[in-house]
């Protein structure tokens, strides 16, 4: 397996998804069969090291081909693509850790178990966000009480935006160990776990979002539920530093894929028509904004390829693309007309889907606060 083969496989699946777009965009749930197809296509291997049988080498080398793969998938099904993006995103916490950790037996053992789960075809996701945190991982109030083993804990607290709930076998999250000043990273095994509270997990709210409606980003409450702490202790902020730019590119690639699909669909819509002056202007502006959006995305990828800490550059590009993608979909709606407000049209769904980028890790307030701080604004 290589990236060329993987992208060919995913392109074929995405094209199949796209042919059923009108039905898929009405779904409020995920289909396990979609993820079975993508597993067979090799998509989980993007988060498995090459020496373990996967495709991962490093952030500078792997980001572009992984993002292109997710961009292709985003053209077919926005929700499925976003959930799939979580898999390499959270596994990057281990993939980008300092090499010297390999000298620690506990770390080697944990990595071996995690990578074995990926090789076995299990999907990884995240349920890190908490109500009232504003997307700030340092504000986690979920409590972690120590178990018998060094990395074994029990979590108690509220979590939401668990994208892929019910599909993802393992979920990465944060919690505050007793007596600690900062939260730590943990993961939970949710395979065959009921959500009725009998096993320590309760479904508190099903995802009913206006955008990304089929991601199953449910809210769950944990009550003394078993969890494993990341074997790299006190790593909350270092993990964010190592993986942040990579993760920002992953989420953004899905949105860029949606814009690809929207522009293609809009072109087919307007080709038979003679556009008036206003429509011509809006189409031209949409084309210009799409060009800028692609330049921003390319800038993010090139920044990552330098091998340095480029979190601010990636966050800038992500924020620019979040704004531009909304503008592009709005202009396309103005050109095509009121039919885009109907549920038989894909454009209204796409507009709400691209808006999700402005709410995703970090959400608008935290994103702009970070950018303002980085530029010295007070």
Image (tube, rainbow, N blue to C red):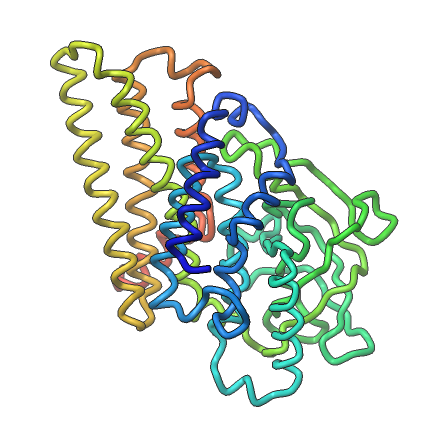
Task: Give the residue at x 19% y 32%.
Answer: 287
Q: Can residue 203 be seen in this view?
A: yes
- Kindly give the residue lying farthest to the bottom in the view shown: 103
Task: Give the residue at x 79% y 44%.
Answer: 195
Q: Nearer the viewer, residue 22 or 255?
A: 22
User: For residue 236, which quarter of the picture?
Assistant: bottom right
- Kindly give the residue lying farthest to the left in the view shown: 277
User: For residue 321, which quarter of the picture?
Assistant: top left
Residue 153, above or below 101: above
Residue 268, horizontal then vertical, whole percent: 28, 20
Residue 238, horizontal then vertical, whole percent: 48, 74
* Residue 323 in the figure: left or right of residue 178: left
Residue 284, horizontal then vertical, whole percent: 15, 27
Q: Nearer the viewer, residue 260 or 329?
A: 260
Q: Nearer the viewer, residue 353 or 21?
A: 21
How many badges with numbers are in the image?
0
Task: Give the residue at x 82% y 53%.
Answer: 200
* Residue 288 in the figure: left or right of residue 5: left
Residue 183, horizontal then vertical, whole percent: 61, 68
Residue 111, above or below 198: below
* Residue 8 in the figure: left or right of residue 194: left
Please identify the quadrant where the C terminus is shown: bottom left
């Amino acid at each position: 397996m290589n990236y060329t083969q993987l992208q060919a496989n995913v392109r074929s699946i995405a094209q199949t998804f796209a042919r059923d777009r009108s039905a898929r965009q009405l779904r409020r749930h995920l289909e396990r069969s979609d993820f079975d197809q993508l597993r067979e296509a090799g998509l989980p291997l993007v988060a498995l090291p090459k020496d373990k049988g996967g495709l991962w080498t490093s952030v500078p080398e792997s980001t572009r081909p992984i993002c292109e793969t997710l961009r292709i998938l985003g053209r077919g099904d926005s929700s499925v693509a976003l959930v799939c993006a979580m898999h390499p995103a959270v596994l990057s916490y281990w993939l980008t850790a300092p090499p010297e950790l390999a000298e620690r037996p506990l770390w080697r053992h944990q990595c071996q178990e995690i990578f074995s789960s990926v090789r076995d075809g299990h999907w990884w996701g995240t349920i890190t966000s908490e109500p009232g945190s504003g997307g700030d991982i340092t504000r986690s109030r979920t409590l972690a009480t120590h178990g018998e083993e060094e990395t074994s804990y029990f979590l108690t607290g509220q979590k939401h935006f668990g994208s892929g709930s019910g599909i993802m076998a393992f979920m990465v999250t944060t919690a505050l160990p007793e007596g600690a000043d900062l939260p730590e990273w943990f993961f939970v095994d949710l395979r065959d776990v009921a959500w009725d509270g009998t096993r320590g997990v309760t479904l508190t709210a099903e995802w009913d979002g206006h955008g990304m409606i089929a991601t199953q980003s449910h809210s769950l409450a944990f009550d003394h539920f078993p969890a494993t702490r990341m074997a790299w202790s006190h790593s909350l902020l270092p993990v964010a530093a190592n993986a942040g730019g990579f993760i920002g590119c992953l989420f953004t690639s899905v949105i860029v894929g949606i814009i690809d699909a929207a522009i293609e669909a809009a072109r087919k819509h307007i080709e038979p028509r003679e556009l008036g002056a206003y429509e011509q202007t809006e189409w031209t502006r949409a084309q210009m904004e799409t060009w800028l959006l692609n330049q921003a995305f390319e800038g993010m990828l090139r920044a990552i390829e330098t091998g340095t800490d480029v979190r601010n550059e990636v966050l800038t590009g992500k924020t620019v693309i979040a704004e531009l993608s909304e503008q592009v979909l709005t202009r396309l709606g103005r050109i095509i007309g009121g039919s885009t407000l109907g549920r038989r049209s894909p454009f209204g769904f796409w507009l709400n889907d691209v808006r999700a980028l402005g709410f995703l890790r970090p959400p608008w307030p935290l994103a702009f606060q970070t950018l303002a701080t980085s530029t010295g604004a007070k």
